[in-house]
Structure formats: C-alpha cells, structure tokens
Image (cartoon, rainbow, N blue to C red):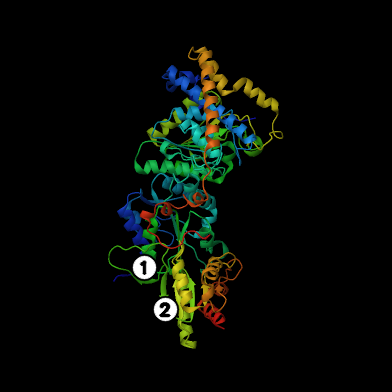
Amino acid sequence: MRKHHPSPAASQDSPAYDPRQAPINGKLGPDEKIQLYRDMVRIRRFEERCLRSYQQGRIGGFLHLYTGQESVVVGANSVLSRHDHMITAYRDHGHALAVGMGMNELMAELYGKYTGCSKGKGGSMHFFDPTRNYWGGHGIVGGQVPLGTGLAFAIKYKGIKGASLTFMGDGAVNQGTVHEACNIAALWSLPVVFIIENNGYSMGTSQERSSAGGSLARRAAAYAMAWDVAENGHDVYEVRDKVDRALRRAHDESLPTVLEIDTYRYRGHSVSDPDTTYRDKKEIEEYKRTKDPIMVFQNALIAEGVLSDAQIRTIDEAARREAETSANYAEQSPYPTVEDIKKDVYWEEDNPQDKKSQGRIFFDE
Amino acid sequence: MPVITYREALNQAMAEELERDPSVVLMGEEVGQFHGAYKVSEGLLARFGPKRVIDTPISEAGFIGLGIGAAMLGLRPVMELMFWSFYSVAFDQIFNNAANIRYMSGGLINCPIVIRGPANGGTNVGATHSHTPEAIAAYHPGIKVVVPSTAYDAKGLLKSAIRDNDPVMFMENTILYNDKGEIPEGEYLVPLGQAALRREGRDISIIGHGRPIQMALKAAAMLEEKHNIKAEVLDLRSIRPLDEEAILATVRKTNRVLIVEENKPFCGIGAQLTYLIQDKGFDHLDAPVKRLTSMDAPAIYSKPLEEQQIPNPQRIFDAALAVLK
C-alpha cells in the first residue's frame, strides 16, 4: 500500500533499531507510560462517543474521526516542551485532547453550544487553544501548513524557545502550499517539524493513486531538508523517538524536518463516508488485529510489568465515563444567541474601549 | 509643510512603524535588496536590516500564509503583494485563514496583518495584472479594506492599518506613486472608516475611492467650467469600515449621486453604496443613483482602449450630466 525509500536517518539506525532503547524512551517512568496509554484510550473513547452523538443526530456537519491514529499525536505531543507549538488539519480532535483541552469544551463545540471551545463557531474541524500553544484545527487541506511555518518564523523572530509541529495528512502533500512552506522553511532555517500523518488514503484515494514518487517525506530532499519515516507509527515509542529527533534539530539547530508517520484510520474519511469503495474491510481488520496502537502499547506495558488488567479496566471505564459526561455537558449547554453571531468577527468591535476606526463595519442592518 | 510623493508617504509610514514597534516586520517579493518592485520600500533594508525587511520567494500563498501564522503568534507583518492582482494565488490564506481565524476560534486568536500593494489598471499590462479586488476583499467579514488616493492618506492610513488588530487589506495605485502631496511635520494618523470631502458642491455628489477620485476632481472642474454645475466629491478612503454618515450627508445635500470606481460593475462597491443610499436616503434623491465603473470585460491591454475602459475625466463628466438630465 505505502511505498518507502530508506530515509537518511534510517540509514543511521542499525538494522536492529529498537525505539525502546532510544534515550527519550529510556527515561520514561511507569507513571508516564501509563499516562501515554491513558491519553490514547481517552482519544479513542471520545471519538466513539462523538460517533454515537452523530448517529443520534446531536452533532451535525463533518466529523473526521482519529480512531486508529492515536499513537501519532500522543507520542508527538509527549516529547514537546511548553515552548513548542502545534497546528493541524481537520482531523483535529486527538490533537486537542493530547495538548490538554477538555472533553467537555470539545464535545460542546461539536454540539454547536456556547460552552464549546470556540463558542460553537468553529465546529469539529476548528478546535483552538492558544493558551496551550494549539493553533487549530484547519479545514482546508494543506492550508494550515504555511500558518505553521509562520509560527516557526515568529518563534525565531522573537528569539524565544520552541518549535512548530505542523501536522498534515498524506493527501496534503500534493497541495502547492505545502511545497511553498517547505521551501521557505528550508530557505530561512525555521524551527518547524512537518509531520505527515500517512493513513494511506487521501479521502478515498490511496497513496499510489494520488502521489507520485514513493515516500512522501522524501520530497523534502528537494529542499535539502532532513526527512525521516516512522514506518511503525502505531508504536508510540517509535513516534516519540522520531519526533524527538526532529524536534531537537529544530531546537538546537533551528532547522526544519519532514517526518512521515505511517498510521491508519479505522473509520471513513469522515463519518459520512460509508467506506465501501476504496479499501477492503479485511485490510481494516488486519490492521486492528496486528497494529492497533492501543493494543500494541497495552501489550508492551503488560510485558514490561507496568500495566495490570485492573488498571486497564479502570482507565477504560474512566475514559468512557468522561466521554459520556462530556456528551451530557454538551447536551445541557446553551446554544449561542443570535447576538453572538456577530461577535468575534473583528477585534475592534469586541473591544470598543480601544476602538480607533470609525464608520460602519457590518452591512446587514 | 513637507511635500512628498505617495510612494514616499508609504515608505515613511512603514519606516516609522518599524521604528516604533519591534513586532512590525516587512515581507514580500523584492522588498529588500531590490528596494521594492515599485521602490516603495527603498532604503528600509539598509536602515532596519534583514531581520525586519525580508525578501520572499515568489510564493504568495506560502509567504502570505506564513505572515498570517506569525500574526497569530503576535507579530505585525506588513506583507507586500507586488501587485494586488496576485491575491488570487493566496486567496485561501487571506479569505479562509486571515478572515476567519478570529471567528472560528471564538475570539481566542487575532490576526493583525497588513497586506498591501498596488491594485489598479490603467498601466497597459493586460488582464492578469490589472485587478481591483476591493469589493471581493470587503465581501469577507473579518477583513478591513483601505484605499488611499493621496500622499497624506497613504501615510496616515497605513500607520493606522499597521496598528490595527484586525487584518487590513491596503490597496495602493501605481499611477499615484509619484503624485505629490503635503503632509504635516511629525506623526499623524488617519483613522479607518473616515471619508474625506475633496470638493464641496450643491448639484451632484460624486462618490468614489482611489485614483478615480483624482479623475472625479478633474471632471468636477469641467462640469463647473462648462455648465456651471457644482459637483461635490467624496473620497471614501476606507471601504470597510465605511463612512456611511458622510455618504448620506452628501446625498442629503445634493440629492443626486454618481458613484465612480475602477471595479467591474457586478457586485462592485457602487452596487453596495447604491443599496445603502436607496435604503437610507430614498427621500433625498431627485434622480436614480448612477454609477460609472470599468467597462464590463477583462482589462484590455491596448493602451488607448484601456483608458476608455476604466473611468476617466471625460467618462465621469458624461456620466454626471446623465444623472442631472
């Protein structure tokens, strides 16, 4: 399904590359490992609860579920410092939970409620939390990639610590904005890590039907940019190691990287995709059976003696309860008012005490 | 009072704001070493250095998007489009990202960016380089649109735009770059959303913005000379926000209106103003509102024809007489 070329970074790895031995993973304590596991389970249970609410007609619009890809954002987020920034595309629920946004505010946003993270103005594809350096949540494929590059530019311009983790899907790599951003990032030595979450399908079109040239990340070579592939993106340890390496390049040398992380989504592109036209159900079942990121990590932690059956049950029950609570919270929350429609359009209109301009700014009265 | 060109006025505005606020950064194609394709940023690289004045590749979606991302994190980028015509290459970045980010984040994120450059025809370069997108830009809630017609306004409005916390589309005119005007000694600002009465009259109001205002003033002189018609000329200066009071005041005074713009007619600025005037000034009208736009075809290359296609003093003169018939 996916074609890869050996990356320059991979060639430095010994054939017996074991991400467990990587320094970033070696220093993980049991509690931290359990937290990674919990974060993945929380995303999965949240997404499942979203799907139920959608099927019940409580959520409208598009709903792009992250189920199956949990190890990518949980692994990546877990190596970030508080100085680092994250931005992604429309499959953004997992990222929002990983950075610490609460299920309540996310679910309420999906319900279109005023208590949602964007007061019901953004919806599923547009979650933001700048207090957590989380810059969305963007609906247009590839559109967020220049923005993420701009975050890196601002970090470097201000002379502050940090890097920009700019996520995109495998479908985005054929958008011009991605190439423009890569060129500028390499040209100006910006501290950005472009992460391609390669789930194999840009909507319903497989990589081989959409992207010429094998490894997507290898395109970075044209910009003399470092690139790497995490072929076992279902393994949270490998994700952590690969992201950490790229992040250090950004932090220590102010250099960009393209990192492709192989992953898989269990649901259709969005929930309105019946998922019957472009892949075999067996393919999904096979991935779930052999590579499910939660199962793989659960087995690893059991083998390591870190996680017990009782803990697994407790974590799962707590995540289900939390998701259920969020649905109730969203259900009981008020909708925005008609007056809210025209708030948050212009900074100046929302801050009349500091308003400098004059005249009419809205034209519907 | 010093007399400077429209170009120098823009240059001074950027220099003063670069000096005043370290978060201001100037980016665009050829803005640094080349001094700007139209020399608007001349000398700024030498004065402020390559950290503040940055040459970009020819990559409008990429660098405009980068500026928007930088603005989200607190910078105040002033982005030059060599021609506003190139906005179409960066359309998604401007009108999905800059325009919507505050709204979609429920007010959590601001985008204090200025995108500036020339937006005009009349330069004999054909359709791709002659777009005037102020109506398209102003269509988008979240966006502000400013169009200076004089050196004084170019400086005062650009300084206000750079300090504004919302995204401002600042549309200049290559043909005005050498026009001279008086400016005060010392700092001044022109607020967005405030029109300027360029000529007082009693018989007809000619309302417009940008270079057509200079043409309207010539047409107004011809009207007075040949027919003793006293035309009032109102320069909007800012499209969004719009000085509705100034528009209605001149309508109440003259009771006849001609709207002049370089845009095409369909959903142009004139269409919006005509709606406004009939809605709020209906009882003060003695004749239907007319508008004079560019002729409704892509911008023609041939120079003598292009001068006929866009507004010119003679066309404005004729259109004003038609309103007064």
Q: Which of the two discs, 2 and 1, sits closer to the camera?
A: 2
Say whether residue A165 is visible: yes
Q: Please tell me whether mark 1 sits on a helix, a strand or a loop.
A: helix
Q: Residue at x 36, y 68 (%)?
A: B152
Residue, disc 2: B200
Residue, disc 1: B152
Rendering quarter of residue B296:
bottom right
Amino acid at pointer 2: Glu
Give percent across and percent down for residue B165. Answer: 40, 52
Say whether residue A259 is visible: no
- Of A302 and B86, nearer the camera is A302
Give percent across and percent down for residue B302. Answer: 57, 71
Q: Residues within 10 Å of mark 1 (few under 14, many from 20)?
A: many
Chain of the residue that carries numbered disc 1 in the rendered image: B
Give percent across and percent down for residue A27. Answer: 41, 19
Label 2, label 1: how many angstroms apart (C-alpha)? Answer: 19 Å
B237 vs A91: above or below: below
